[in-house]
């Protein structure tokens, strides 16, 4: 049931994009967070394991990549190097926002 609701939400988000031809920043972040949960398995149970602020630190790394227009992995990247996947400036902001949302959810559920 939960997956059906998420798929429905993603469908609605795609409709919104088609109507305006672009997503809002909040919609992009929401879509990325759901992609992380559905495709990567990074749900709240997974996120609760990161209790040393790793999600916030990862968000900061993507934000720094945006601010400095630099795709090099920061020395403070908290995960395996293969998980560092910067792309373009907007997508880096979206990833940072989704990681912030994940950290907020983790804090709310811990």
Image (cartoon, rainbow, N blue to C red):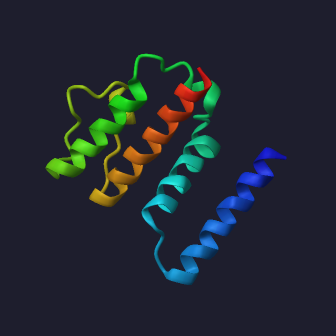
Identity of the residue drawn at 46% across and 45% down: 98
Residue 46 at x, y percent in the picture: 59, 26
Which quadrant of the figure has residue 82? Answer: top left
Identity of the residue drawn at 37% across and 25% down: 79
Identity of the residue drawn at 48% across and 59% down: 26
Total numbered circles:
0
Residue 53 at x, y percent in the picture: 40, 22
Identity of the residue drawn at 61% across and 45% down: 39
**61 relative to 43 in the view: left or right:** left
Quarter occupied by the C terminus: top right
Which quadrant of the figure has residue 40? Answer: top right
Name of the residue lying farthest toward the right = 1
Residue 52 at x, y percent in the picture: 41, 16
| Residue 71 vertical position relative to residue 7 in the rendered view, above or below | above
Which quadrant of the figure has residue 109? Answer: top right
**27 relative to 67 in the view: left or right:** right
Residue 47 at x, y percent in the picture: 55, 27
């Amino acid at each position: 049931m939960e997956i059906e609701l998420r798929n429905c939400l993603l469908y609605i988000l795609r409709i919104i994009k088609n109507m305006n031809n672009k997503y809002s920043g909040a919609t992009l972040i929401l879509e990325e967070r759901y992609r992380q949960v559905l495709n990567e398995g990074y749900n709240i149970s997974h996120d609760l394991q990161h209790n040393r602020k790793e999600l916030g630190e990862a968000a900061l790394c993507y934000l720094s990549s945006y601010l400095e227009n630099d795709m090099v992995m920061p020395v403070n990247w908290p995960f395996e190097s293969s998980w560092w996947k910067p792309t373009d400036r907007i997508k880096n902001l979206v990833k940072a926002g989704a990681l912030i949302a994940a950290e907020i959810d983790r804090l709310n559920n811990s």
